[in-house]
Image: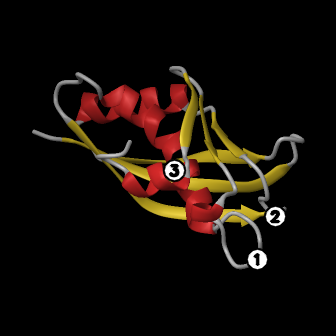
Amino acid sequence: MFTKLPAAYFAGVKVKTLQTDKAVVTVPYKWLSQNPFRSTYFACLAMAAEMSTGLLAMMQLHHRKPFVSMLVVKLEANYFKKATGVTAFTCNAGKAFEQIVDDCIADGEARTYTATSTGTNDAGEVVAEFFITWSFKAKK
């Protein structure tokens, strides 16, 4: 992560679980991830949320022919509670990403998919919910 995503590395973003259907990524509240309001800065929360969705998408692209490119085209978020500890973002969209990539390769048409990543604190309370729209296009 240090060489490819240095901001996430310094903010303390960590992959906790990575399976074909589920990813959990955490971000702590610490000096490098804080905002002036004594909670985790929204951009650090967004990094962890994006990573939880992006890892699942990338898993579906690995060794696929033809090559499929992916890009974030939209991000929406709802915040419910101050993030004052470790926030764990969970995305369960692995099967949906698999279907989108299969369809994209099958007909060569570009596709978009909006994945949900839900951030919870140590008490299991929802801190934030992110909706990240990914675009996929098979290269010819």
Residue depth check, mark 2 versus mark 1: number of the one nearer the observer? 1
Q: Quadrant of the N terminus?
A: top left
Q: Which residue is mark 3?
A: 50
Residue 76 shows up from this direction = no
Q: Nearer the viewer, mark 3 or mark 1?
A: 1
Q: Position of residue 47 (x, y in %)?
A: 52, 55
The type of residue carrying mark 3 is Glu
Q: Are marks 2 and 1 in contact (CB under 8 Å)?
A: yes
Question: Where, by quadrant of the figure, is residue 67 drawn?
Answer: top left
* Farthest residue, direction bottom: 36
Query: Earlier along the polypeptide chain: callout 2 or callout 1?
Result: 1
Q: Quadrant of residue 52?
A: top right
User: Which residue does the numbered mark 2 point to in the structure image?
Assistant: 82
- Image check: 128 left or right of 94? right
Please state the horizontal and vertical placement of residue 26, each as a whole percent of the image.
63, 42
Asked which secondary structure carries label 2, the reply is loop
Question: How far apart are the two marked residues, 3 and 2, measured between alpha carbons?
Answer: 19 Å
Q: Which of 138/75 is in front?
A: 75
- Which amino acid lies under the numbered mark 2 shown in the image of this protein? Lys
Inspect the image, locate mark 1, and give the three-letter code of the amino acid beneath it: Phe
Marks 3 and 1, Cα distance to the nearest angstrom? Answer: 23 Å
Residue 89 % position (x, y): 66, 43
Q: In the picture shown, does residue 85 fall above or below 52? A: below
Q: Residue at x 27, y 28 (%)?
A: 106
Eye-nearest disc, 3 or 2 = 2
Place of residue 45 in the rendered image (x, y in percent of width and height, measured from the top left): 62, 57
Tag of residue 37: 1
Q: Secondary structure at mark 1?
A: loop
- Residue displayed at 29% across by 46% down: 3
Position of residue 44 in the picture relative to residue 55 (left or right): right
